[in-house]
Amino acid sequence: MNLLFHIGNYFLMLSKVFGKFTKWSVLKRLILADIDNLIIGSMGIVSFISFFVGGVVAIQTALNLDNPLLPDYLVGYATRQSVILEFAPTFISIIMAGKAGSYITSSIGTMRVTEQIDALEVMGINTYNYLIFPKIIALLFYPFVITLSMFLGIFGGYMACVYGGFSSTSGFIDGIQLDFIPFHVTYAFVKTILFAFILATVPSYHGYHLNGGALSVGKASTTAFVWSSVLIILINYIITQMLLT
Amino acid sequence: MIKVANLQKSFEETPVLKGISTTFEKGITNLIIGRSGSGKTVFLKCLLGLYEHDSGTINFDGLEMDTMSRKQHRELRKQMGMVFQGSALFDSLTVEENVMFPMEMFTKKSHEEMRDRANEVIKRVNLIDANHKLPSEISGGMQKRVAIARAIVLNPKFLFCDEPNSGLDPKTAIVIDNLISEITDEYNITTVINTHDMNSVMEIGEKIIFLDQGEKAWEGSNKEIFKTDNKAVTDFVYSSNLMKKVRQVYLES
């Protein structure tokens, strides 16, 4: 019953987000601030993780392909497939659920605890639109983060393979070009857009509807991370089933 | 003027407001007092429209809240100013930006016009050299002044204050009380203050409503509160020895 209540409340929240719009000049400022915090502010950690995890994927693939009959290019091929299909869109989204999600929950939650949301409501502002809509728009730029992650993941794999002596440059390059299916990139970006919507709205829901004080902000951030991750994994499964089988 | 008739509000079958009727007059400071849990905050939030009441009516200058159109409701909101207990200033905005915020949302003024008006009200609440500071960089008393400046920047008809001097030292609390009282007089607005503070009651309580367990137990002025023999009021107001002595001196004089 409790879960159904929250699902219903979440969709009610979404309908209000697209209700009465905030003045464009104010909204524009909020969107730019959220792009800065959620997208540009995440580039560093995403780049770091992508580069090194890409490297680890390549090394582990190379170590498991120790049969001399297996071609050199398989490492590049496996790295590309792992990074584009799963690592960049899904793994990075789980990390973003922790980074951007907890930022969203705690910032909105603190506004709730300190009565700033009440102050906006008293002024007659649609607080759902004012607080959540800019985050949804900002996270429309999330595919750029994932594109960067894909590039750096594969580049990290290349560096690890070539400089670690697991594969030759030409072998790795051949591998990443082998049997390339452009639809796999489309599939990755379809997932990314859906994950971006979850990353913007689920933490917002938990921040907006929290009750209590400072401790509740921490609890809500954790709950938001858990639910965002669960939804990302579930949607990942459903989309994969729908688009790749 | 705000007229409230038979206002009722419950939370999950627990009645919190049990048929409150009163009138908040224009141009004077109206105080709501009562013990913690007596329903003061719920009453204030019902007046503000933050909580929907179950039954009864709230009438703002002849317009009934329940029968208002959406447009009228939006207009009414613009005529309301609110000072929250914790000031509720926007953390990421400077003092000046906080005060400009309602104008930015609801007026078509140029940036210069908004800044001039913001500076005018910031000066009115006696804030000096704080325009470009963030709320976290100023004291609690200064934050309250900014909250008052933000509440009056659109020339509201109604000003609501929830515990405006909680957490302040006695001297600053009196300054804030007097500021609210002066602004009420100057702007000729209907001011409703929710408070626990007996200094406020004595200093600016032109009209006082005492709530007890969700009911209006007493209504009168700060002069009349000395003479009342309503047990609930005397138990609450004269609970300290100091207040008992103040009452004794007042009655003797």
Image (spheres, coloured by chain):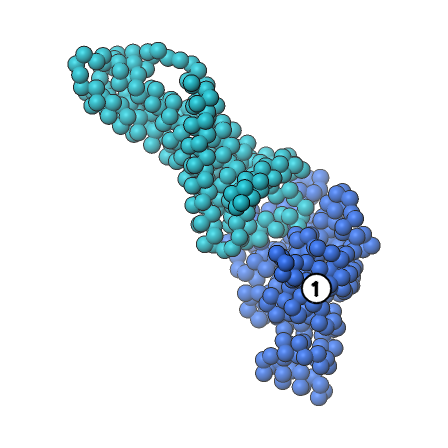
Chain colours: A cyan, B blue
Q: Amino acid at mark 1?
A: Lys
Residue closest to the eye, B65 or B147: B65
Seen from the viewer's position, the closer of residues A31 and B146 is A31
- Please state if B118 lies on the left or on the right of A176 as rendered: right
| Left or right side of A84 for B216 | right
Q: Position of residue B44 (x, y in %)?
A: 67, 59
Quadrant of residue A171 in the image?
top left
* Residue beneath the point at 32% across and 15% down: A176
Q: Nearer the viewer, residue B143 or B199?
A: B199
Quadrant where the C terminus of chain A is found in the figure? top left
Q: Looking at the picture, how far across and down is residue A18, in whole percent?
A: 63, 35
Q: Is residue A97 above or below residue B49?
A: above
Relative vertical location of residue B99 with respect to residue B201 in this rendering, above or below: above
Tell me what residue is drawn at x 61 percent, y 51 percent.
A118
Q: Residue at x 57, y 62 (%)?
A: B141
The picture places residue B131, in percent across and down from the top left corner, at 58, 51
Q: Which residue is denoted by mark 1 in the rendering?
A: B18
Q: Name the foreground residue: A197 vs B253.
A: A197
